[in-house]
Image (cartoon, rainbow, N blue to C red):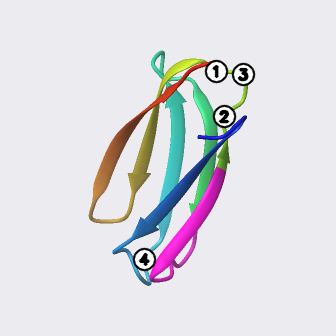
């Protein structure tokens, strides 16, 4: 994470629709992004808003779901 964004790379979901959902620990959505058809490697900068502490990045396809914890500090 740098400043108000997190750099994210996703691979292994070629030709699939992908949803990225960044939420805080209360379940409030910080950012949501859709990809209709992912390439071999997708790179993103996700805005973190004003949230501090732990954020959860949920990445979903039609058949898979992964969740990663991000820790944002000042």
The residue that disc 1 covers is: 51
Q: Position of residue 46 (x, y in %)?
A: 64, 47
Disc 3 vs disc 1: Cβ atoms closer than 8 Å? yes
Assess disc 1: are there few (<14), some (14-19) or many (≥20) residues with their C-alpha within 10 Å of its C-alpha.
Answer: some
Of the residues tagged 1 and 4, which is closer to the observer? Answer: 1
Assess disc 3: are there few (<14), some (14-19) or many (≥20) residues with their C-alpha within 10 Å of its C-alpha.
Answer: few
Disc 3 vs disc 2: Cβ atoms closer than 8 Å? yes
Answer above or below: position of 54 versus 20.
Answer: above
Quadrant where the C terminus sits is top right
The residue that disc 4 covers is: 16
The residue that disc 2 covers is: 48
Q: Secondary structure at mark 3?
A: loop
- Which numbered disc flags the more N-terminal residue, 1 or 4? 4
Residue in the picture at 34% in, 65% down: 62
Of the residues tagged 2 and 4, which is closer to the observer? Answer: 2
Q: Secondary structure at mark 4?
A: loop
Q: CA distance from mark 1 to mark 4?
A: 30 Å
Residue in the picture at 44% in, 84% down: 15
The residue that disc 3 covers is: 50
Q: CA distance from mark 3 to mark 1?
A: 4 Å
């Amino acid at each position: 994470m740098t400043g108000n964004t997190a750099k994210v790379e996703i691979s292994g979901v070629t030709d699939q629709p992908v949803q990225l959902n960044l939420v805080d620990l209360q379940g409030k959505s910080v950012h949501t992004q859709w990809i209709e058809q992912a390439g071999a490697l997708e790179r993103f900068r996700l805005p973190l808003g004003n949230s501090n502490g732990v954020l959860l990045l949920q990445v979903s396809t039609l058949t898979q779901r992964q969740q990663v914890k991000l820790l944002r500090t000042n």
